[in-house]
Image (cartoon, helix red, strand yellow):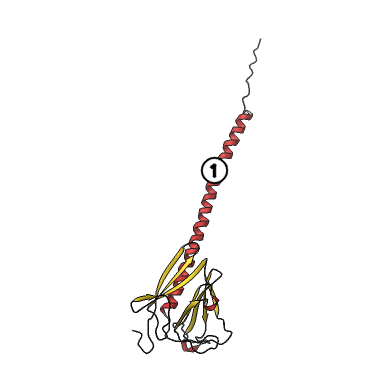
Amino acid sequence: MSRIIRQKNKGFTLLEVLIALAILASLSVAAYQVLNQVQTSSIVTHEKEQRLAEIQRTLAIMDNDFRQMALRKFRTDGEKPGKLLLVAKDNLMSSDSQGIMFTRYGWLNPQMQFPRGEVTKVGYRVIDEQLQRIWWRYPDTPVGDSGNVMKLLTQVESMTFRYYYKKKWVDTWDNGAALPNAVGVKFKLKDYGEIERIYLTPGAELGASDD
């Protein structure tokens, strides 16, 4: 009599399948969290790099303007020439904090090819938490010439100035015959708090040499 041997087929039970799915789900969630953290970190790093680049660009532009400050008075809105070579006060040019305005050299115009001079007028103001640079083609501007606006820096809560002259710092500038030797510009930013930069100027006086 032949003996039939039957082998019992072995498979996965429902419990084993559920456990395997649970482990796979846990690994997937962990992998997603790691990937999400990497992506978030990359985005935050990129945003900070862009922010720092924005701040550095702004400070470089201001440095270029202040270093070439001109010993020249100017007219605004067709009025008589002002008494000061540098004007800085609250709400200047509708600024939400202090604003500043002066003339500068260095705007090259070889053989007068362009409809402008080589001396231009520039100003800085804060409008709606944005630092703006305003420039005019000529230092003496007629009525209604509001200038050209360049948007520089965001998240600016305030901007203030101080001036170095005759070996001391002062908070206001009312000398109509001279430029300060340096200007301190202090920003209050939402993300980085207070930042101050000292800019050297020509520091000349009317009737004196620039040396």
Residue at the spot 41% in from the left edge and 78% down from the top edge: 67
Q: Quadrant of the N terminus?
A: top right
- Please tell me whether residue 83 is drawn above or below residue 19 in the rendered image: below
Compared across the picture, whether 67 is left or right of 40 comes to: left
* Pointer 1 local density, CA inside 10 Å: few below 14, some 14–19, many at least 20: few
**Amino acid marked by disc 1:** Ala
The residue nearer to you, when weighing 112 against 3, is: 112
- Give residue 2's position: percent from left, percent from top: 65, 12
- Please tell me whether residue 88 is drawn above or below residue 46 in the rendered image: below
The residue nearer to you, when weighing 190 against 139, is: 190
Q: How many discs mark residues in the rendered view?
A: 1
Judging from the image, what secondary structure is the residue with disc 1 in?
helix
- Please tell me whether residue 63 is drawn above or below residue 40 in the rendered image: below
**Which residue is label 1 attached to?**
30
Residue at the spot 59% in from the left edge and 39% down from the top edge: 25
Residue 104 quadrant: bottom left
Q: Quadrant of the C terminus?
A: bottom left
- Give residue 115's position: percent from left, percent from top: 53, 87
The residue nearer to you, when weighing 110 against 63, is: 63
Residue at the spot 61% in from the left edge and 32% down from the top edge: 17
Compared across the picture, whether 16 is left or right of 133 comes to: right
Outermost residue toward the top in this view: 1
- Give residue 64's position: percent from left, percent from top: 43, 76
Outermost residue toward the right in this view: 1
Residue at the spot 52% in from the left edge and 50% down from the top edge: 37
- Give residue 181's position: percent from left, percent from top: 37, 78
- Please tell me whether residue 27 is drawn above or below residue 122 in the rendered image: above
Residue 23 quadrant: top right
